[in-house]
Amino acid sequence: MPHELNQIIISSSGANFEKSLKKFRSKMMRAARFAGYGSEENQQVIDILSNVAEHGDKAVAEYTEKFDGVKLAPEQFRIGRDELEKANREINQDILASLRQAIENVRSYQKDILIDQENLPRGIRYTPIKRVGICVPGASAPLPSTVIMTAVPAQVAGVKEIVVVSPPRYEGSIHPVILAVCCELGIEEVYRIGGAQAVAALATGTGTIGKVDKIVGPGNKWVQAAKKNVAGDYVGIDSIAGPSEVLIIANEQANPAWIAADMLSQAEHAADSSAIVLTDSEPFAKSILRELQKQVAELPRAKAAKESLKKHSAIIVLEDMAGAIEIADDFASEHLEIQCGQDSREIAEKIHNAGAIFIGPYTPVAVGDYWAGPSHTLPTGMRAKFVSALTSNDFLKSISIIEYDQEMLAASADDIVRLAEIEGLGAHANSVRIRQRD
């Protein structure tokens, strides 16, 4: 086995196991903290946001030419309805059939988990967000699944206005499969802009692009830095999406070729993606390594996958599987696969922190990426400890409803006045006291 991949095994039989594991965890935490970007990139993004807020469409056009190499006038940002319909008509019918079934799967699941407005306790009401922006990567490869996994949950929640932004390709177009999906979903507001400038346009609005209330979807480090900077002040966001990651808990009952394939399915995304395996068998770990070496050579994106394996991935060999749950919860991976035979479900029930859990040998991450129903927009970089997968409920906001009658206020008045006076808020107290004088 080539030395460059041998180094990814971290074995409990080694003298420096705890030190090596701690070092690898620290590396993962650094990646989680910065989501691929540093202070220099962050400052550049702040400048872009400020420029777009001040100069609007003009700034967006300048950045699009600078970063994407495409010169567009503001009136060319938006994709026309004719172009959307043309893409939908001309798409391969087998592909369209698969996309339609994926849409149906996601819609069905998201409806099932939507908060039931008919059976709410008193005092609360949920309303959909009015206008949502979706970032869809697409300059290097089309990602129609991103449109489905973000727009469909929003539609199920009742969002009326959905805006899609996607970076233009070298000749200024958006990949037709993305346009076809937008048309299929009835999304008519689609703009050929991307990067931090697109996030800025959505967050602040321009002469051409109306401001949104929430921004969701993946993107490169510039997009993530932009989302983080506009979150809270201008708009809501889903989460900060760092590099793709998978953690696999597997014992010798699993197929090493399948485990290797699942590692590579994340590693091929980018050089900073991570793929981690937890197992209790060193021979099994070496079998996975052999499969990795064989399979990676056959990948179109072999270079990125190899870099990911060498720099951000590991096969961790434990003394036994008892510690796997603790490590998995600590890493809080975007995708968590469990392939431990009959014990898989039991292990899954003990996991507290993961974006999505994939149970059993016949549930690779790709099932969730494209088909099963839950959104593939998941927290990365250990954020699954406090952030959840995107769902239809993320496009709802709650309003508290309070209504007291005279008798109810009278019964509570003394307590309310007392608490207000403790805080030194006399007008608060008086607003209750004045109602008791009649």
Image: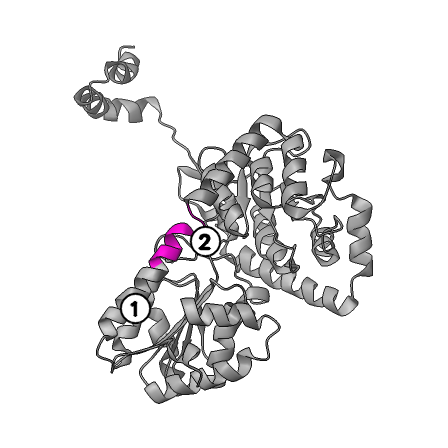
Question: Hey, what amino acid is under mark 2?
Answer: Gly
Residue at 39 percent of width and 86 percent of height: 286
Decide which of 432, 76 is in the foreground and name it: 76
Residue 274 sits in quarter: bottom left
Residue 55 sits in quarter: top right
- Toward the top, the furthest residue is 438
Callouts 1 and 2 close, C-beta under 8 Å: no
Residue at image mark 2: 36
Residue at 74 percent of width and 64 percent of height: 96
Residue at 26 percent of width and 81 percent of height: 320
Start-end of magenta stretch: 29-38
Residue 263 % position (x, y): 47, 74
Residue 327 is marked as: 1
Question: Hey, what amino acid is under mark 1?
Answer: Ile
On screen, residue 311 versus residue 212, left or right, reads left
Label 2: which secondary element: loop
In this view, 144 is above or below 235: below
- Which tag, 1 or 2, sits closer to the chain's start? 2
